[in-house]
Structures are given as structure tokens and as C-alpha cells.
Image (cartoon, helix red, strand yellow):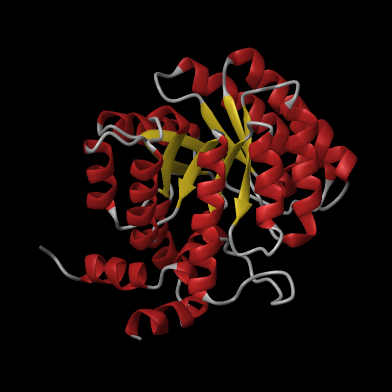
Amino acid sequence: MFNKLIVALMPLAPRFIIKMVSKRYIAGEDTAAAMAACKRLKAQGFLTTVDILGESVTTDGQAREARDSYLELINIVTENQIEKNISLKPTALGLALSADLAFDYISAIVKKAHESGVFIRIDMENSPYTDKTLEFYERLSGQYPGLGTVIQAYMHRSMDDVTKIAARGGNLRICKGIYKESPSIAYQNAEEIRRNYLKLVREMLVQGAYVGIATHDQYLIDETVKLIAELKISPDKYEFQALLGVPIDKRLEALVAAGHKVRIYVPFGSEWYAYSSRRLKENPDVAGYVLKNIFVKN
């Protein structure tokens, strides 16, 4: 309750307080900080994916700038001894403005990534963009195999989408979903979401498609580990995924020690405020953790 109160009062907090919080979730504001974070995580046995913070641009110029930033990020990733893996959001590339514009910009990024041996994950956002995001993935994945997208377990449609993509041997990250969606299109009950999540992961594994198991829910992690053992799935067909800063480090380290791949999502950039605010709303317990570490000296 106390942690939720902190989050409720967050809009009244000075930005410097939120920036302290952001340090847990965000590698920094520039590529140098992101590369340093990825190298540190690599030394701990983790894989990584990097992402430039920002979404829902309002002008073509902003979308073009985002495209150019991702093209440069591909260069930087290939020059550093880190995992060649990048995530991007379609609305950051202009999807809310024009589907054609966004497709052109994402295509340019995916093409260069393919030439550089870099994997691109097209992230999923809220429901107005689901169809176009999956269309982009379908159009590009046939030509560029180093490409994946995301399915959200709380959406009613997700099993149909997963079945189609799994049958084609696609590459999916499965997550619960964080956007506020209508009960008419999305499950609202936590147990229903959990059940659907496990069904989606099972479908990917049974079909032999590659799946990123993206969750901080330790019940889902445990159940998925059991499922992998039950189906005798090879470690090259799946990975666990987590956000930078989410406080389940020991569980993630245990997964690595047990022979599972674990990838950490490493965001960076100047748009730290909106991202940190969203992370705190998703996980209020972190608010109390951060506050304690600000004011209590060891």
C-alpha cells in the first residue's frame, strides 16, 4: 500500500527524484552508457537487447531523426563486443502518423541490420497498432530472417496470431502486456492472463519456433521451466527475457546457472521520465526499494 501511494504521488515529485529512480531502469542518456551496461551484463552471463527510449512521435522530422539514430546504433553495436540485438517501437518511427512512412523507416533499419548481422525486434504497442505491426513483421521477415516481433498474452486474439507465426517458424517475444485495453479485446484477470501466457509459450515450443519468454512473474518462470523440461526443448529454441532494473536478479542468475539463456532489455536515451514513470506504475514495489536506497545509508 505504501509503495502504491508513492507511485500515486509521483506526478508531484521533483524530476530529480524520478531521475534517481530512472537510474535503476535505464542505462543512461547516450550510447556510451548503453554499451557499458551491455558489457557489464555480458560479463555476468546475460544476453542483451538495446533500445532508444521514445515513442509516439508527432512529426515526420522526429520519425526521421529516430530512424537515423537507429541506423547509427547499428554501427555502434557492431563496433562493440556485445550481443547484436536491437529493439524498436513502431510509433517512434512514425506509425501514429503514417503506416507507409513507418514502414519505409523500419525497412531501412531492418535492411541495414541484416547487412550488419544485427537482429531487430519490432516491439508491440497498444491495440490501434497491432495489425500494422504484425503486417510489417510479416512483410519483412520473409526477406530478412534476423527479425522478430512481440505478442501480448492479455489480448484475446493472441493465440490466433501465435499459431500463424509459429507455423511459419517465426521469432516471438511473449509478454503479458502493459497497455490499458478494453475488456472486449483483452483479459483483465491476472489468472486468465497467466493461463493464456503459458498456452502461447507452449504453442511456440511445440511448433519448434523461437520464443523469448519475457516475464518477471516468478510463477510463470517456474511453470515455463517445467514446460521446457517436459517437452525436452533444446536451449537454442528459447530464451528468458527481463527488463533492466527489475529486482529479480537472483532468479535471473539462477536461470543462467541452470543453462538457460537470459536476455536483458537495456533502454537508453533522453526520454527517461515517461519510461521510468511507466515502469513504476507496473511495479510499485520498486518505488519503495528506491526510496529506501535514497534515504537510508548502509
Point out the image quarter for the C terminus.
bottom left
Q: Residue at x 71, y 59 (%)?
A: 157
Task: Give 217 or 94, whichever is nearer the viewer.
Answer: 217
Q: Position of residue 151 (x, y in %)?
A: 62, 51
- The answer to whether residue 141 is above or below residue 50 is above
Task: Give 78 or 137, whichever is nearer the viewer.
Answer: 137
Residue sticking out furthest to the left: 298
Q: Position of residue 236 (x, y in %)?
A: 43, 27
- The answer to whether residue 22 is above or below residue 111 is below
Q: Residue at x 54, y 77 (%)?
A: 189
Asked if residue 176 lies left or right of residue 62, the reply is: left
- The answer to whether residue 191 is above or below residue 172 is below
Task: Give 71 or 100, whichever is nearer the viewer.
Answer: 100
Q: Position of residue 212 (x, y in %)?
A: 49, 41
Residue 52 in view of the camera: no
Q: Residue at x 63, y 39 (%)?
A: 166
Point out the image quarter for the N terminus.
bottom left
- The answer to whether residue 167 is above or below residue 188 is above
Q: Residue at x 51, y 17 (%)?
A: 78
Count how many numbered circles sit on residues in the image.
0
Quarter location, residue 110: top right
Asked if residue 185 lies left or right of residue 235, the reply is: right
Quarter location, residue 292: bottom left
Residue 116 in view of the camera: yes
Q: Position of residue 207 (x, y in %)?
A: 57, 37
